[in-house]
Amino acid sequence: MNHPVLTRADCLARDAADPLAALRERFDLPAGTIYLDGNSLGARPKAALARAQQVIAQEWGKDLITSWNTAGWFEMPRRLGDRLAPLLGAHAGEVVVTDTTSVNLFKALAAALALQAPHAERRTIVTERSNFPTDIYMAEGLAGWLQRGYTVRLVDTPEEIPAVLGPDTAVLMLTHVNYRTGLQHDMAALTALAHRAGAVTVWDLAHSAGAVPVDLHEANADFAVGCTYKYLNGGPGAPAFIWVPRRHQATFTQPLSGWWGHATPFAMASSFTAGEGIGRALCGTQPVVSLALVECGLDVFGATDMHAIRTKSLALTDLFIALVESRCAGHPLGLVTPREHPRRGSHVSFTHPHGYAVMQALIARGVIGDYREPAIMRFGFTPLYTSFTEVWDAVDVLKGILDEEAYDVNAARGAVT
Amino acid sequence: MNHPVLTRADCLARDAADPLAALRERFDLPAGTIYLDGNSLGARPKAALARAQQVIAQEWGKDLITSWNTAGWFEMPRRLGDRLAPLLGAHAGEVVVTDTTSVNLFKALAAALALQAPHAERRTIVTERSNFPTDIYMAEGLAGWLQRGYTVRLVDTPEEIPAVLGPDTAVLMLTHVNYRTGLQHDMAALTALAHRAGAVTVWDLAHSAGAVPVDLHEANADFAVGCTYKYLNGGPGAPAFIWVPRRHQATFTQPLSGWWGHATPFAMASSFTAGEGIGRALCGTQPVVSLALVECGLDVFGATDMHAIRTKSLALTDLFIALVESRCAGHPLGLVTPREHPRRGSHVSFTHPHGYAVMQALIARGVIGDYREPAIMRFGFTPLYTSFTEVWDAVDVLKGILDEEAYDVNAARGAVT
């Protein structure tokens, strides 16, 4: 994969030989656009429209309240969790799709701190300064409210992590693939290090689920959360997930003890008793329409496996890096994403002094990536629908913009999601 | 309204004179069904199907990531909150539609406790044993995790509340209209009592919003949360809402400090700084498709007002009570819901020794109400789409079932939502 493809014809040939190429037909992608932002919002599975119609017109409109039972609405968080589990190296009964990533992180982190509560000296939550901000914010929120000496310690580089883990560490909380750099942590190695130091791990799989092979049990991880609207193509803001391995379920406890987590929710008891198993990670009534669409994204994964997805992901990102570095040589681009395969996720980031303006120019020409402070252009590659020829064409557009200096360095900055 | 209508023809005449009758056309209701469960899941506004198609096919499918800005996805919690505010006696900039009722209650309760934190002796959260269970469970969760002596005190009757409020009370947390009995509390009077005792109030409006006139500012309430999928017809499990009046916004703080509540979410700062105003009640990324459908429900309210809705609601519930008591006289039915108008919400509950079996028989004959332990049959009346003739017909079916004893007292009990 380290030999750059030098012609568009080579890319066309790769697409012709791509075993995943047919899956693109299962997505609705706008004509005239090269969509390299599936790491932010995954494309729409065509099936989502009919599924929404079924839920809205039939299940809600006609069957009304009975659908909580007859259409399986109430069981959906568990059923979708069971379908998602194999993509994470998790077992059935260990995952629920529910709430938001932020809220699920709060639950997982609280449960991790509860496990450590007997060790009064363990009061530090270690994470990266470059972690996705909401993870840090949620940790700050939980630590601050508990008022028991918990602090959040931010490390500036992954290399610092081993030295920081120690007798004061309660939790190592990391995002598996960094949202900005695309760096993939070694989950098994870091989990082992954390355990050796007596710490518990919480992994955020937002940029991993459906993008890179994850094996939570193999890594012996403790808790995990993640997002369904990126590589899992579940729809904008679709409910997130939380994983609690069976070995931690009996002791799993978290403050958001809503009725969906109760042992007998319809007995309407006046005091909380946690249910068995993964159900105790649930809280309140879920947004059924958005939740149902998550299944349309998961269905596509049934036609392939994470090994095939990873093979193509690395081929796409290798190709992109090679083409940018060869065809845009001479421009001030800096590769941020690791070259080593095991340390790479499924997106590639390059810095450019005018990164924001260049990205705006790319978007104007139909190449959709996104921008992250500081100076980082981010390009996501979704093996289910991104083609090798699109990679060629995207670099071609980038080269044109850079060669012509066809970007407005004074472009006003809007909100970017 | 206290003169029972004695013939079906009278009900038809009332429907003909009903100024809200035309609004029924804006809902999709299944033929052959009398739907009296809008207090659990509101019926589907016809517009919801086209709106879902727009969000899924165009905004997600074609416009993809740009829709966070161009389609206003990011602003939707605030925009919908501003549209909902007038139904609650709230102002623009005081309400967001987001997360679940349980999660929002957690935020509101946390903020209320924070206001009381300087008063070390105020450590009791007062609520009713008959409150909707998740409210009690969330209070237990928050109190337990804070480990600062907070306790949840349950009163058995509303009449006990005044005597219980005292120097140890931090918060009076009540559901405005009881989910089981349909009793409506006097929000202004209880808030005044609470304030006199030095307590802060948190109101759950799940069975009030869109059902009865609410004036949060007039009542001088402190915090409120509620649900959009009951009388607001926002769709199954649609995101809930939270109200924080402007006078409490500057000090509003809660543990779920996710990136959507940050002052500058896209600056990706590595520490949390709460945003201004109601934004600090937000946490994580919201389920856009479900959220968008909330607007279809709110749109219907633009064609009427809460005064007209309340007038019809009382007429419907008066009629139902009168018809049941006159036509089903001799059967062991007990009215649970208050007869006095100011103390009644928009649903009516009757006990029957075989309440569960009778409700199953009603549902089998197309009259959809629901059952709540113990022995309570619950009938919800949504003035936007329930007709007077339906009330007649529903009582007719009930009378037939009771007269014929056409119910199975051994009916197996399934999960009921």
Image (spheres, coloured by chain):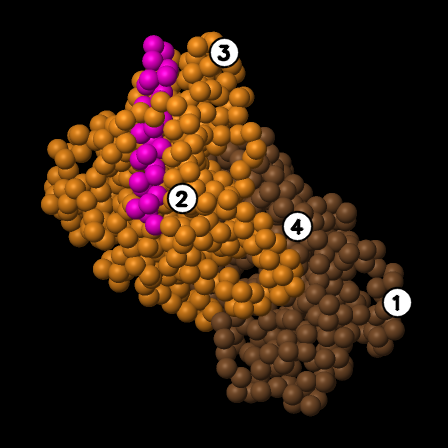
Chain colours: A brown, B orange
Q: Please name the amino acid that badge 3 sits on.
A: Ala
**What is the CA distance from the residue labelled 4 to the residue labelled 2?**
35 Å
Same chain letter for marks 1 and 2: no
In the picture of the structure, the residue carrying the numbered disc 3 is B406
Residue B357, image x, y percentages: 47, 16
Query: Viewer-nearest of labels 3 and 2?
Result: 2
Mark 1 closeness class: few <14, some 14–19, many ≥20 residues within 10 Å:
few
Q: Please name the amino acid that badge 2 sits on.
A: Leu
In the picture of the structure, the residue carrying the numbered disc 1 is A13
**What is the CA distance from the residue labelled 4 to the residue labelled 3?**
43 Å
Mark 4–mark 2 contact, CB under 8 Å? no
Tell me the element at label 3.
loop
Residue B269, which numbered label?
none
Query: Viewer-nearest of labels 4 and 1?
Result: 4
Q: Is B112 contained in the magenta span?
A: no
Q: Main SS of the magenta segment?
A: helix
Tag 1 subunit: A
In the picture of the structure, the residue carrying the numbered disc 2 is B20
Q: Please name the amino acid that badge 4 sits on.
A: Ala
Q: Please name the amino acid that badge 1 sits on.
A: Ala
Mark 4 closeness class: few <14, some 14–19, many ≥20 residues within 10 Å:
many
In the picture of the structure, the residue carrying the numbered disc 4 is A48
Tell me the element at label 1.
helix
Q: Which is nearer the N-term, disc 4 or disc 1?
A: 1
